[in-house]
Amino acid sequence: MARILLIKAEGLGRLNYAVTPPLGLLYLAALLRRERGHEIRILDLRVSKDPARSLAKEVGDFLPHLVGLSAITMEAPSLHKIASTVKNLSRNIPVIAGGPHPTSFPEDVLSDQNIDAVVFGEGEQTVLELSDVLLDGGDVKRVNGIGLRKDGAYVRTPARPPIQDLDALPFPAWDLLDIAPYSHVRGMASLGFRRYMALFTSRSCPFHCIYCHNIFGKGFRARSPQNVLEEVKFLMKTYGIREFEILDDIFNFNTKRASEIFSMLPELGASFSFPNGLRTDLLDEDQLQLMKNGGVNYISIAVETASPRLQKLIKKNLKLDKVWNAIEICNRLRIFTRGFFMLGFPTETLEEIKQTISYACSSSLHTAMFFIATPFQGTEMEAMHGKKNSKIQASFRDYDYFAAPFNLSDIDNKELFRLQRNASIRFTLSPKRIAWVLRDYPKKRFLWYHGWKALTGFLQYSWRGN
């Protein structure tokens, strides 16, 4: 039995930074413990008041035989600082990195001599096998699904097939995590600070949007409705949780499965939110009514663009009329909706940007976010249009969801960012929208939470130096 420390990196100095329990690490911990009996600890630096001190103390006290790190691109600087701290305490501790950032930037991550290997995509089986090899001194190159250095050069081993039977995985190791801090930070759903837990009920999305990652592959894989219900009941009974955020890539791709889960929810008496993961043009009135009856009170609707031409270009091919209808139904059912829109797509014109803003502001959405299209490395948009074609040159260390330093559109930088800022102001100050928010948002959370959110949002946009 070995001691393994799993660490979630922090996003340094960012505003409006959503933090949810690290489900990926919780799944890894559960499998490592069940299959190998290892002693596991989880350290989430995003909820630590003093991350540097917490890290040094945890490594010093626990003396792990192996350290695993997880990070998104915004957390990349923290990832490398953590690796350096661990190696400074002991050069003999193997450090492996996984998650969206190492998967997208493996060569950059492995240029750091403090990181010994990168795990690509879905990590459970890979980490299980890799930990065996690292702890027993085997041949690392025989492990599929990793990147490593060999004689100073980057080497990638063959890809590992995705896990097909998700029901066979243990539930996340919630007992290893103090869930209290997550009720004091903003989650993915803009529902205020409250006690909740996050769920993955499926993995992967079969669509091929050019701006999206490919971490879980493109074959939709789902847990059975019964397995999902069992986990929810366990969390309710064990931790007294009554609110859940479902974080799937596309929960409702299999509409029959989605309807079966929705039909089970009323018996639970819980609340559910979808901060992402719903393909809105696959929702009809019957499903939305099932959702409402089952306690779904919040969904995010990713429209991205209201231009039919750009819908084809970005390969989302959303049926905008069906999305519009779903938004109207949600408003009527008093399901709180948040829209996602992206501005600055490759070749996007001024008229198309205005078309998207007009769609958002004319809709029955309660809230909306307007992002800048970002060519993350490893995506088709980066390969097709890339940072080299952006009117602003930047490295991955400058990526930010709200103030992304890129412009792939046909308009100049100043105009693009002015349109983004004005879209947010125009949308938010609509009197009818304010009335809808006051009507449907949980009253006890509204003033203090949205006042804070409006302030940080203003600072976020003002922070941009362009």
Image (tube, rainbow, N blue to C red):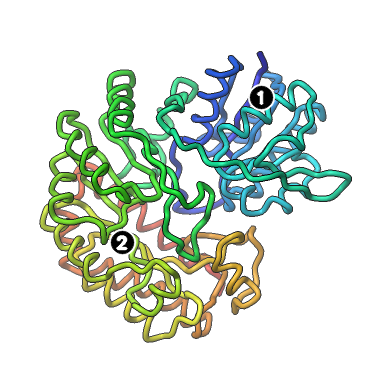
Q: Is residue 449 visible?
A: no
Q: Amino acid at mark 2?
A: Gly
Q: Position of residue 246 (x, y in %)?
A: 34, 41
Q: Residue furthest right?
A: 151
Residue 38, placed above or below residue 316: above
Q: Which residue was labeled with disc 2? A: 339
Q: Position of residue 332 (x, y in %)?
A: 11, 57
Q: Residues within 10 Å of mark 1 (few under 14, many from 20)?
A: few
Query: At numbered mark 2, what does the secondary structure look like: helix, strand or loop?
Result: strand
Q: Quadrant of residue 223?
A: top left
Instruction: Name the quadrant of the N terminus.
Output: top right
At a point 32% along the width and 67% down the height, the residue shown is: 318
> Which is nearer the eye, 446 or 359?
359
Q: Quadrant of the C terminus?
A: bottom right
Q: Nearer the viewer, residue 409 or 461?
A: 409
Q: Earlier in the sequence, mark 1 or mark 2?
A: 1
Q: Amino acid at mark 1?
A: Lys
In space, the residues marked 1 and 2 are separated at their CA atoms by 42 Å
Residue 337 visible to the viewer: yes
Residue found farthest to the left? 332
Q: Are marks 1 and 2 in contact (CB under 8 Å)?
A: no
| Residue sitting nearer the eye, 269 or 141 | 141
> Which residue is at a point 29% across and 73% down the rendered structure image?
426
Q: Which residue is mark 1?
A: 57
